Amino acid sequence: MAIQLTDTAAQRVRTFMEKRGKGVGLRLGVKTTGCSGMAYVMEFADELEEGDTVFEDKGVKLIVNPRSLVYLDGTELDYTREGLNEGFKFNNPNEASRCGCGESFGV
Amino acid sequence: MALLQISEPGMSPDPHLHRLAVGIDLGTTNSLVATVRNGVAETLPDEKGRHLMPSVVHYPDQGPPQVGQEARGYSALDPLNTLSSVKRLMGRGVSDLKTVAGHVPYDFVPGDGGVPRIRTRQGDVTPVEVSGEILKALRARAEASLGGELEGAVITVPAYFDDAQRQATKDAARLAGMNVYRLLNEPTAAAIAYGLDKGQEGVIAVFDLGGGTFDISILRLNKGVFEVLATGGDSALGGDDFDRAIAGWMMQEAGIEGDTGHHRMRQLMMDACAVKEALSEREEARLKVALSDSDYWSGCITCEQMNCLIDPLINKTLAACRRALRDAKVKPEDILDVVMVGGSTRVPRVRERVGEFFGRAPRVDIDPDKVVAVGAALQADILAGNKPGDEMLLLDVIPLSLGIETMGGLVEHIIPRNTTIPVSRAQEFTTFKDGQNAMALHVIQGERDLVDHNRSLARFTLSGIPSMVAGAARVRVTYQVDADGLLSVNAREMVSGVQSSIEVKPSYGLTDNEIETMLTDSRSHAQEDMLARRLREQQVEADRVLEALDSALGADSELLSQDELKDIRDAREQLAAAREGEDHEAIALAIKGLERASEDFVARRMDQSVRKAMSGHRVEEFE
């Protein structure tokens, strides 16, 4: 079981965490919503919850709850730029399909 | 796939439900757009990495208007079709142009309407339309950067903007297809950007010297709430004026005549600006001014020389600071923090003098060009609902009193200046004449006693008042100012329930009363205003007495002998003559004289009406 970040993503997360000035890590997850059934969740975490798994990679704590972990195992989190837009991207081997707009996915 | 951003705990958006919100600093010289991404508020750059977008619009021969850096390139080549600093014209009327037009070298269309129009090769445009183009460009940049449609924006305006100027800003946003969550005062945004809302409680001064406007705001942070204690400033003072002062010096040194063409003036202003920037880092700058195609004048200017040129302008800003402190009833030593905003606060001399004035080093850590946009973005993020249970609440004040015209062209203030908004205040008025069934309401902004010396915001009429004797109708006039500082006025006759209301839409076409001047005038003309008020009050009273007498004579003159009638008529003539004069005491005297002369007449009328009322009734009925 592992979740990783690219160097760029790790660097951005560290900067954002630093500027926010509080929090124990970055919570990654999935929620059941959207046209293809699932959507990614990415939030600052202020506390750990029971059953959370914590992956530490490149100085960043990635926090995942057990329900989400099965969908995220093997994911690599990247940070990219597309034109003027920039943001995080999940490279998730579990993804089987994705809705046309790319806002949600299925497994 | 869509790129993701980090949200606050529990605030992840559902797919397709991103609430993209931005803060926009719509400046005189430059504009910026900022947003909160991954918990960080940052300004959004264009594809070349430039954050500032010059507030310049160029109307080319063909194709859509160009905005920003591209447009600015044309300012020297095609000055009449390249519009900048239009913020100075927002919400101003044609008659206001005299004060500002000297500074903006455009061809104004001599027109009939109130809104000034600028002639370009693509047709005549209004300042609102030009601002709309700037906002459109910012919106496009934001949507490209955020990968979605904007839900809303917070746009900042100088604290000193009056209702017409605020409404004009909102109109520009509407033209750009933008939903405005609210307008926010620039200095308030700056305080938020510095996170002063989470800091120590106390009084904060925000010194904002931009390209074209100067604002000083005195804010107080109390239990996490910002209250604006006072605002002051000058809506026509900024870095442009520094440039103008330096350009003037250059012209003098180079022996250029005062009335030079559009092209040359532009070039000189750009040179002056470059000199100013160079002198922020060095002690001395060299300069070269083209006298003709082949001839140049070259010279040298030192920091000290420039300081002498700009000191009078800095003095003006400090005088405004002093007034704002007095309005806020605080002393310089009560100020906990001084925040510097606006590109012109990079000038070392400005920082030095402001530091001396407040007796503490001002805050300059956040880029003074970006700080307002950043604060607006933080506010937009909260208003869009992207932040959990945040308690930040902002209070603003109205910059000038709002009042209503009463008989005799006098102003009665309904909401005094520096009242925190939103606010709603009501006052009751009544009719002046018997059977009066309409009332004209004139909404006034300003501090002076006579209507003519203030700014007229709107006029409307309450009609359908049922016939009643003078003074019997009860007209309740309610002034309401919303969180954006926009005014709506409602008038309601309480007996019959008839009502009428108006939203104060831009009153572009009205005389310019530059707010600064208005405030100074209200102090320097206090004595004169008082005398004028007394005179008008006596004139109104005289009119009322004459009106009442005439209607009484019309009805009951048979109660008087010829001699009595003559006495009353004489006294009446005396009053009518005095009323036309300028002496309020003489009018008061004549009113007394007429009252004395008609005492018996009044008594006889009274007896007669009592007799009429009682005749045909028995005494018992009155017991």
Image: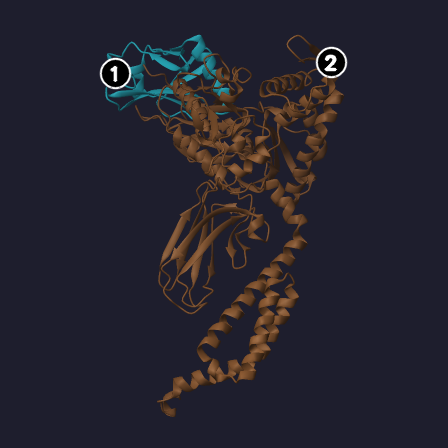
Chain colours: A cyan, B brown
The quadrant of the picture occupied by the N terminus of chain B is top left
Point out residue B280 in the picture as x, y percentages from the top left corner: 68, 19
Residue furthest bottom as drawn: B619
Point out residue B254 in the picture as x, y percentages from the top left corner: 72, 17
Label drawn at residue B299: 2
Q: Amino acid at mark 2?
A: Gly
How packed mark 2 is, by other alpha carbons closer than 10 Å (few <14, some 14-19, many 20 or more), is few
Could you tell whether B460 is left or right of B564 in the image? left
Q: CA distance from mark 2 to mark 1?
A: 64 Å
| Figure check: B77 above or below B188 | above
**Is disc 2 placed on a helix, strand or loop?**
strand
Identify which residue, A62 or B133, lies in the foreground: B133
Residue at figure coordinates x 58%, y 79% from the top left: B567
Residue at figure coordinates x 47%, y 39% from the top left: B114
Residue B360 visible in the displayed image: no
Point out residue B468 in the picture as x, y percentages from the top left corner: 40, 68
Q: Amino acid at mark 1?
A: Gly
Point out residue B310 in the picture as x, y percentages from the top left corner: 70, 27
Residue at figure coordinates x 47%, y 76% from the top left: B552
How packed mark 1 is, by other alpha carbons closer than 10 Å (few <14, some 14-19, many 20 or more), is few
